[in-house]
Amino acid sequence: MKQISSLIAAIILSLVVFITVNFAGPAWLAETATGFNGKPEDWTNWVNVHLAIWASFFLGLISVFLNWKGLRNQKATADLPLLNREENVVYEREDRREIFASASKLPENSIVRQMVQRALAQYQGSKSWSQANEVLKSTTEEMQSRVDLGYTTVRYLSWLIPTLGFIGTVLGIANALEAVGQLTPEDFEQAAFLPEVVAELGIAFSTTLVALFLSGILIFFASYMQAEEEKFITDVFGDCVDNLLNKLHEET
């Protein structure tokens, strides 16, 4: 359901861009961004490719935005006073139970909750600091893998966008060559067709230009957000080591 909503939102945003650029923007911007050169009969030759490019771009941005919202919520749970960060503190059995119970009140997808509870559960069963540390490490690796998998769609879209741009360019060149093939020898002598053909080729190559530009923007935001999410997981791991594992009371 979330994917369908994101797709619908991406299409709506793309249509808004098309309407705004084509009816309120300058002609050169309309030609470059949407392929519309003022001729309604030619507009349909480009709208499919350009609309797909913009829809893919906005779909990727929406995905990155949702990841940003998720990270913001995760950071909010990490700021809660779950662990005692004072020095010279040792967690006894009752302290561990209280921390485990407090972690249970956090959302199920909370990274802090999962790390704390897994580490405490392992320590409770084995009474081994090293085993609890290994569980914490494996949990960190698992969550970082989940983050990487969460950007699979964005990576695909960042590849799809320039591909669509190249498709649009090939279609534009084909249309221009088709128009040239219909010319008579007299048309070639007068060379009056050149401005129109050059304009068609300009729109064709601008399709790739726009696609590469949008793909670069999407890759930038996706890379930045993925790095921020992985950094947050690493920070939570370090916090759990410093303020949970290192404060456990070794029991025999």
Image (spheres, rainbow, N blue to C red):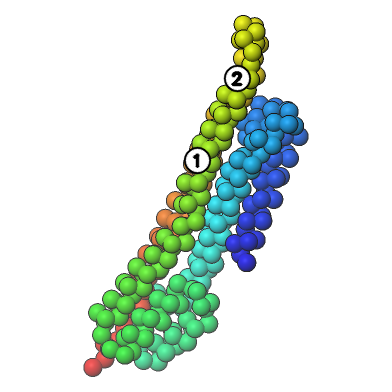
Which numbered marker is on residue 162? 1
Q: Is 11 situated left or right of 232 in this image?
A: right
Residue at the image point whose x is 39% and y is 87% from the top: 96
Vertical position of residue 154 compared to residue 209: above or below: below
Please name whichever residue, 100 or 82, is drawn nearer the observer in this view of the structure: 100
Q: Amino acid at mark 2?
A: Val
Residue at numbered disc 2: 180
Residue at the image point whose x is 39% and y is 65% from the top: 145
Q: Is 215 situated left or right of 175 in this image?
A: left
Disc 1 versus disc 2: distance between alpha carbons?
27 Å
Residue at the image point whose x is 50% and y is 68% from the top: 74
Vertical position of residue 218 compared to residue 70: above or below: above
Q: Mark 1 or mark 2, which has the lower sequence index?
A: 1
Q: Quadrant of residue 233?
A: bottom left
Secondary structure of residue under mark 1: helix
Quarter the C terminus occupies? bottom left
Determine crowd level at label 1: few under 14, some 14-19, many 20+ residues with C-alpha closer than 10 A. many
